[in-house]
Image (cartoon, grey):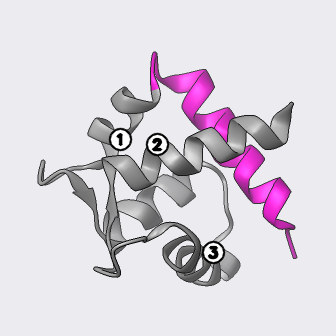
Amino acid sequence: MFSKETILNKIRILITNHFETPEDAFKFFDKDGDGKLNKAEIVKLLKEAKITGFIRGMVYSKLIEGYDKDGDDLISWEEFKFAIDEMSDESN
């Protein structure tokens, strides 16, 4: 099983290698344009980050648990930015 650091690193690599800014990544995965990432959108991000299907559901749950500050089961831009900042801090 992947560690939290490994998973966050895979997401960070996806974002830094494929997008100009974290906001561009957020907008790319926010397919319905509502300003929040729903389960399907987060799962797509995890798939693109090469998180295997076997653990994708568990990772989704942990991401919601760790970063969904307002409890709506969605990840807003502010929550996404907080996660990105944490990923950047852990990589340094």
Residue, disc 1: 26
Kindly identify the amino acid type of the residue bearing the numbered disc 1.
Phe
Start and end of the magenta stretch? 1-21
Does residue 73 sit above or below 17 in this rendering?
below
Q: Residue at x 35, y 73 (%)?
A: 39
Q: Residue at x 80, y 65 (%)?
A: 4
Within 10 Å of disc 1 (Cα), the crowding (few <14, some 14-19, many 20+) is many
Q: Which mark is residue 59?
A: 3
15 drawn magenta:
yes
Kindly identify the amino acid type of the residue bearing the numbered disc 3.
Val
Residue closest to the far front? 70
First along the sequence among labels 1 and 3: 1
Residue 90 picture quarter: top right
Residue 87 relative to residue 84: left or right? right
Residue 60 percent coordinates (x, y): 53, 75
16 drawn magenta:
yes
Residue 57 picture quarter: bottom right
Residue 10 percent coordinates (x, y): 72, 46
For this rendering, which residue is in front, 42 or 51?
42
Residue, disc 2: 81
Residue 89 picture quarter: top right
